[in-house]
Image (cartoon, helix red, strand yellow):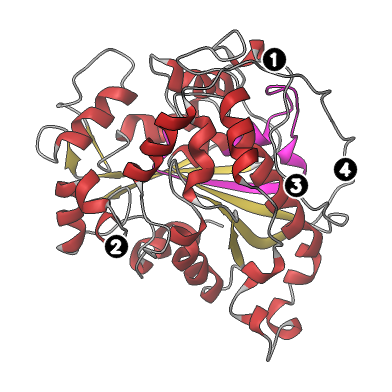
Amino acid sequence: MKCSDAGGLQFLGLLTVLSALSSYGTDAFSTPSHQGGALPSLPNVKAAVIVPGFLTGKDEFIPLAQSLTAKGIPTVVVPMPNWHWLPCLGGRSMRPMLERIDFTVKHLAAVAGDLDQFDSLTKDTDLSKDPQLLIPNFSYNPIDLYQDFRNNPGGVLSVGGSAEVDQYPLWNPKGTFQEAPEAQGKVALIGHSAGGWICRAYMSQRNYGGKSYNGHELVHSLVTLGSPHGNAPGAAFKGVEWVNNDVMDAGVRALAVGGTGYKGDSSGQLTQNAYSFCCPNGSDGSQYDGDGVTPIESALAMKEYVTNADTLVLDDVGHFCWSDVFGGETVAPELAQFHKEGRPWYGDDDIVEKWAGWL
């Protein structure tokens, strides 16, 4: 199975837009928080939502969703392109992503009661092969992007006054999200890379930047793939630090998956820099092992903060399908070459078999 290159990793384009937007001010605006009440007990359903990692979007993960669907786990991807990450650059609030996760989970949960009979219900329809059609699109335009980039709090510039999550001003991301019908069941979440720790924020009962998402009410299981769960210095890890301040014990099963075989001193500059970025002690990253982006220690650290979390180490498994996406060979030439030579990533069929059975 290959990643789609339709969305690509258009870093040059993203940086160009970022440069243009950064000339504007960063005055934050306030809106009241919105919190819902507790939901009644719901049945667990074998269906899943994939949350893409940083600077990736739906297109890159559709092949993984199709693979899981073919294995009997109807799966959808949060319906967003990679440029929707722009307002979160620099370690800023992940509320734009949390809104998208919430939207997708609620729409899948609304039909989840029927997914136990998914095959019979969708026979001879497009839905039988593509449950993504169950999830409506949402509206998000360039003006919304500008407003979000200007006002999304936190990060290295302390937009809104602070880089600390608990000090973010009350603020709601832009976009028009269609309200979902009443939930019929609980689904699983699969978070890749940064998407994994953001899923933990989604399931928290605490207030994150003006809203408590309480995703544990709609999620029965969490799988994280190469996600950085360990604390590390810098604004980009303020969100990780925030989720690690509490032990999650909300009855949600959790599995942290990490890859090894990509040594920091021999897998290219991106790998060494990424390992150094994720390290808590100021290391240059050269002595770490991992999946080429996330050190194995950080990928498995969720077990320290989530009650009864399981872990799975996959030898010689990489972080991403670098050679299949536009720009991958430019951003990570060594990792792209390894992938082109046949070294697998978390989303390859043979590797999916090793972690999907846990669901």
Residue 131 shows in the view = yes
Q: Residues within 10 Å of mark 2 (few under 14, many from 20)?
A: some
Q: Which amino acid type is marked by label 3?
A: Thr
In the rendered image, residue 198 lying in the magenta stretch gets the answer: no
Q: CA distance from mark 4 to mark 3?
A: 23 Å
Measured from the top left, where is residue 46 in percent x and y? 66, 63
Stretch of the chain drawn in magenta: 199-228
The answer to whether residue 258 is visible is no
Q: CA distance from mark 1 to mark 3?
A: 21 Å
User: What residue would you read off at disc 4?
Assistant: 39
* Apparent side of residue 106 relative to residue 282 in the rendered image (left or right): right
Q: Of helix, strand and loop, which one carries label 1?
A: loop
Which quadrant: the N terminus? bottom left
Give the residue number, with chain letter if any, for mark 2: 324
Does 135 sit above or below residue 219?
below
Instruction: Using a 10 Å C-alpha cutoff, classify the residue at mark 3 as few (fewer than 14 neighbours), some (14 to 19) or many (20 or more).
Output: few
Q: Nearer the viewer, mark 4 or mark 3?
A: 3
Q: Position of residue 4 (x, y in %)?
A: 39, 65
> Do the numbered discs 1 and 3 sit on residues whose CB atoms are within 8 Å?
no
Q: Which residue is mark 1?
A: 169
Q: Amino acid at mark 4?
A: Leu
**Callout 1, which amino acid?**
Pro
- On screen, residue 77 versus residue 115, left or right, reads left
Packing grade of label 4 (10 A; few <14, some 14-19, many >=20) is few
Instruction: Give the CA distance from mark 2 to mark 4.
Output: 41 Å
In this orientation, which residue lies closer to the viewer: 151 or 23? 23
Q: Is residue 219 magenta?
A: yes
The reply to whether callout 2 and callout 4 are in contact (CB within 8 Å) is no
**Among the 4 quarters of the image, the one containing residue 230:** top left
Query: Which tag, 4 or 1, sits closer to the chain's start?
Result: 4
- What element does badge 3 sit on? loop
Q: Is residue 330 left or right of residue 189?
A: left
